[in-house]
Every structure is written in structure tokens, then in C-alpha cells.
Image: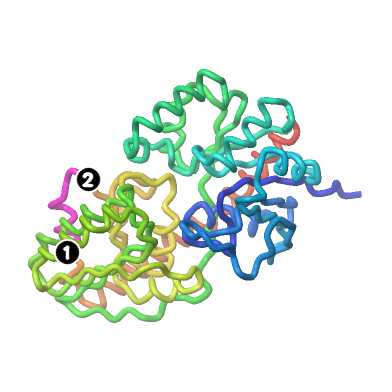
Amino acid sequence: MNNPKKNILIFSDWYLPSYKAGGPIKSIASLVFYLKNDFNFYILTGNTDLNNKQPHSNIKSNTWHTLEHGERVFYFSDDFFSWNTLKETLRTIPYDVVYLNSFFSKKYTLYPLLLRKTGFIKKNILLAPRGMLGGGALELKHKKKHAFILLSKLVALYNAVCWHATSTQEENEINNVFKKVKTYTIPNLTTLPLEERKNYNKRPQQLSMCCVARISRKKNILFAISCLKHVNQGTVVFDIYGALEDKEYVQQCEELIKTLPKNILVSFKGEIRADKVETVLQSYHAFFLPTLNENFGHAIVEAMLNGCIPIISDTTPWRHLQKKNIGWDIPLNKATIFVEAIEELVQMPQTSFEEKSKKVQQYIRQECANNQHVEAYKTAFMALISQ
């Protein structure tokens, strides 16, 4: 007789059909997709998308829903969520392990950690900080963040928590903040595009680039625009898709755009629905994102899967791209190299672009289709369940 499937309880601020928070949503959705035959998933989340006040129109709040891959999802409304309603909801879930998807989330990380500290949650917790402990991320609002970390250590809030890092870089970031902790280092899982790229149109002296990201200081869009100021060759289009999180920062970007030479066309395109991202990416030559820090970089991976050549910073797990001849990962103090990479792509003819684009796709597909990563997740969850 087969043993019944074990149950994983996931806390996350956002889950499908939300999409604006990007990577964390994709991380959970991919985990469910690949492990749905091995575990039952229960997900506690909010009923709105990032920066939205209106709840999802097609989702009834404060009740359970069964989604496409069998995951059971409870969408809390703000007025219903409380310490007591969370406890009452948890009493109805036969969970064997808890998986948290943020370091700073009040509702979906701090509440469950406090419930474990008081003894209400007795199961093991695996916490994925999602890049929030990286140096670039901690420097933003650093006084507030460092004060919180100090206080959390004083009250031992994270004691006995196991950590999920998606790269050795993130493992080091976690250990720089919390010494000698148990960490499972497993890359995020990613689903492949529904359609293969067919459009490889590229003329010399023309380049279309995009980025798909939340428009915030962490994504370093202002730096990207400043690099374009020094591109003197050809016609370059740079389209920026994503939620305009920081209005002051966006205004700074718009002021800099006004100073660009006439051969550089930069536009904010607004938010893009998740089901449209694939088609949009396949219409561009390159993906330009000199981010301050990414623990994985779902947007980068998705762009590469759809044939965009990456021009990114060296603060992500996607390293040594030049050596592999599939793009550039460049130190942020080397702005001239970003300019040189863009100008090289500007001059590139269609045959060379198609060859490079296909090489990018082949590389990232091999990385994403790694069954060892799926098995590593199974092993990690079963280890935590059996302890």
C-alpha cells in the first residue's frame, strides 16, 4: 500500500492569479507544478495583487479554492485576516511542513513565526528570503531593515528555522546575517515557454531591448538609462514593463530620458499580464537589467528562455555569460562595458543574432530542465517532515 502524500503549507503575500510581484509567485507556481504528484499543497495568501486595493474579481475571498494543479488556496481579505482567524484557518489544514516566501512580510512570515514561537505551529519551517538578505536589497531602507534584523535576533524569532537559498550566493548572504544556520541550496524551478521563438529579425544598426521588472531602485533602471546616454551607434529602443512602484524614482528616470540622444528611444510600457509576457519577450533582441541584487532572477530566466540576449549585472546567479558566449554579466562599476555590450549588439546582423539567441535558449533550457533540482526539493521537504 502506498503511503499517502504529505502536505506542504505555503504562506505567501501573493499567488495566482496575481502576477505583479513577479518572481516569488512564479517560484511557488513552478514548485506546485513539478511536485504536485508527490505532495499536496495548501497556500495561504492575500486576495489582491501587488499595489492593488481591489480584490481579484473572479476569486471569492476567505474561502478555499482548488486551482489548476490541485493546490488548495485560501485568499485572505485584509479585513478578515487577524491573529485569531489565521489560527482558526490553520486548525483546518493537515499540514506536515511550513514553507515561508518572504523575510519581511508581516502577515505571511512574521505571524507564522510568532505562532511557532508560542507553540501553536509545531511543524518545521523552511524560509525562502527571496533575495531580501542580499547586500543590494538590505541597503535600501537599510536603517529600518537592520533594526528589524537586530530585534529579531534578540527575541530569537528565526531560531530553529531552516533556510532555502536558490544559489550559493544567496546561501552566503543568509549566513552573513544569521550564522551557522541549516540551509538547503536548491535553484528555483521554471516552466518552459508554451511556444518556441520564431522571430529573429535583426538589422545592423538597430537594437530593441526590454526589461520586465517592478520599477524600483533595486532594479537599477536609472543606471540602465544613464548607460544608454553614451550609446552613439544605431537606433536603440529600450522598453520598460512593470509596475511603477516608486513614483519619485520613476520621475528621476523620466527626467534622464529627456536628456538622451535622438537615436535612443526609452519608454515605460506599464504592467504586462503574465499570459502576454512570452509573446512580448519574443519580439525583442535583448534583455537589459543591471539589477542591484537577485537571488534567482525569474525575469532574466524567462527572457533567456524566449531568446533575449541578457545584459545584466554580476549580482545574480547567472554568471560568466561572456565566457559561454550567451550574453553579459557586468560589474556595476563598469558602466563602459555595459555601453560596449549594447553597441556590439547594435552592430550585430540577423545571422549572428539568431545563432546567439538560439544558444541562449539551449543553455537556459538545460538549466531549467534539471531533474536533480526537482529531486532536491523532494528530499528537503521529506527531511523536514521526518525530523
Question: Looking at the rendered structure, which numbered label has been put on residue 100?
Answer: none
Provide the residue designation for mark 1.
257
Q: Main secondary structure of the magenta part?
A: helix
Q: Residue 120 in the image: x percent, y percent?
A: 74, 31
Of the pair 381 and 100, the residue shown nearer to us: 100
Which one is nearer the viewer's eye here, 360 or 222? 222
Can I make out residue 98 in this image? yes
Quarter of the picture holding the C terminus: top right
The label number, if any, that marks residue 332 in the structure image: 2
User: Residue 92, position in %: x, y?
Assistant: 81, 46
Q: For the residue labelled by badge 1, is the local secondary structure a helix, a strand or a loop?
A: helix
* Badge 1: residue crowd in 10 Å (few <14, some 14–19, many ≥20): some
Residue located 53% across and 58% down the image: 190
Mark 1 or 2, nearer chain start:
1
**Residue at x 42%, y 52% (from the top left corner):** 297
Within the image, what quadrant is residue 57 found in?
A: bottom right
Q: Is residue 328 visible?
A: no
Query: Label 2's element?
Result: loop
The image position of residue 109, as x and y in percent, is 58, 39
Residue flagged by tag 1: what amino acid is it? Ile
Up/down of 331 relative to 20, above or below:
above
Residue 315, image quadrant: top left
**Which residue is pictured at 40% across the width and 67% down the height?**
271
Type of amino acid under label 2 = Leu
Relative horizontal placement of residue 103, taking residue 33 as reference (left or right):
left
Q: Is residue 150 above or below residue 59?
A: above
The magenta span reads: 332-341
Q: Name the foreground residue: 353 vs 9.
A: 9
Q: Nearer the viewer, mark 1 or mark 2?
A: 1
Does the magenta segment cover residue 340?
yes
Mark 1 → mark 2, Cα distance in angstroms:
20 Å
